[in-house]
Image (spheres, rainbow, N blue to C red):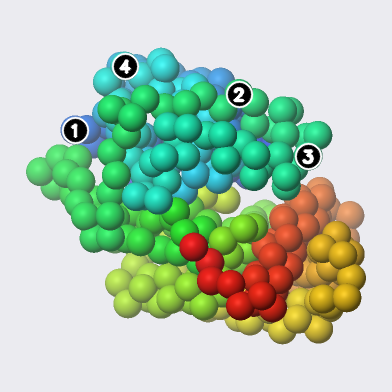
Amino acid sequence: MSIYRIDSRISLVDLMDLSLQERTGSYIINEESLTIIETSASPSIPHLKKGLSKLNINLEDIQYIILTHIHLDHAGGAGLFLKECPNAKVIVHPKAKRHLVDPTRLIKGARAVYGEKFDELFHPIVPIPEERVIVMGHEEKLELSESCTLTFFDTPGHANHHFSIFDPVSNGMFTGDTCGIQYSVRSKHFYFPSTSPNQFSPERMKDSIRLYKELHLDRLYFGHYGVTEEVSFALGEVEKWLDLFMEKSKKQFSSKVTVEENVKAITSVLFELTKSKMIQKGVEPDHSIFKLLKLDMNVSAMGIADYFIRQSKGEETL
C-alpha cells in the first residue's frame, strides 16, 4: 500500500484493488471539511484505513465520502467504511442513492459479471442508511472551505449513475471512469476507455469528454489510476480509442452467436489492439500489466456487446 502526496491539499491512497498496486485509488482532499473520493470494494477498506492513519487522519474527522458512481470497484466498500466514520455523509449521483440504501440489484448485477469470484472481490456489501446519503445533481456545489467549493457534473457514458467532481483550486476533475483508465508503466502512460456493462453508451461518453474539454482542465484524477496533467492528450487518446473499440468490435459482433461468443471475440480484438500499442511504445511483452489489461478488455467487451444487443433491439439505456 502506497500514499502519494499530489500537492499540499490532495493525497492518493493506493487501495490495492484486486491485490494489485496502482489499480484503484482513494483521493483525500484535506480541506476544512475533510473529504474522501472513492472507497473501492470492501477488501480495500483495511488499506484505506492504513493510508489515512499514515496521513494522521482520524476517521471521526471525515465529513464527506464521495462516490463517482456505484460500480463496486469504486463504491462497494462505502457502507463498511461508513460504519467507522460517525460524522461522515456519503455523496452520490441522483440515480445511485436507492442502490446504496438497498444494494440487492447492485449485487445481482455484479454477480452476473464476476460469477464465483464475486465474494473474493467484493464481499461484504453493507447497506447505507438513507439519512446518511446526500444526492448531488448536475452543477450542484459543495463547500469544503472558504477557498474550495466543489462542483458536480452529470457525466454518463460509462454509467448513468456517474458524476464527476471539479476542484477549482487545482482546476482538476475527479473522473471516476468517465474518461477511461490510465495505465502507467515506468514513465510511459496509456489512456484507454472503460466500456463496462450494462449502461455503456459511446455517444454519451463522448458528450462527457466534450464537457471536460470545454472546462480547460489542468488535471485529471483517474479512479484507475492516478493523476495526469497532460489533459488534452489523455482525452484525445480516449476518444480515439473509443472510436477504434467500436469500429473493430462491430466487425466482430454477430446476432447469430451467443453473448459469450461475442464477448470472447471482442475481448480478443480489444486486447490485441491495446497490447500491441503498449509493446510498440516499449512495454515488454511479458510485463505483468497485460494480465490486468486482459481483465479490463474482457469487462469492456461485455459492455460493448451489451450495447450492440440493446441497439439491435432498439432499446435506450435508462
Q: Are marks 1 and 2 in contact (CB under 8 Å)?
A: no
Kindly state the secondary structure of the residue where label 4 is placed: loop
Q: Which residue is mark 1?
A: 32
Residue 34 as seen in the image, left or right of residue 303 = left
Mark 1 or 3: in front is 3
Residue sitting at x 82%, y 50%: 291
**Residue hosting label 2:** 124
Callout 4 touching callout 1 (CB < 8 Å): no
Report the Cα–Cα distance between label 2 and label 3: 15 Å
* Residue matched to label 3: 115
The earlier-in-sequence mark between 1 and 3 is: 1
Q: CA distance from mark 1 to mark 3?
A: 42 Å
Residue of label 4: 86
For the point 42% across and 70% down, the residue is 208
The Cα–Cα distance between marks 4 and 1, rounded to whole angstroms, is 17 Å
Observer able to see residue 91: yes
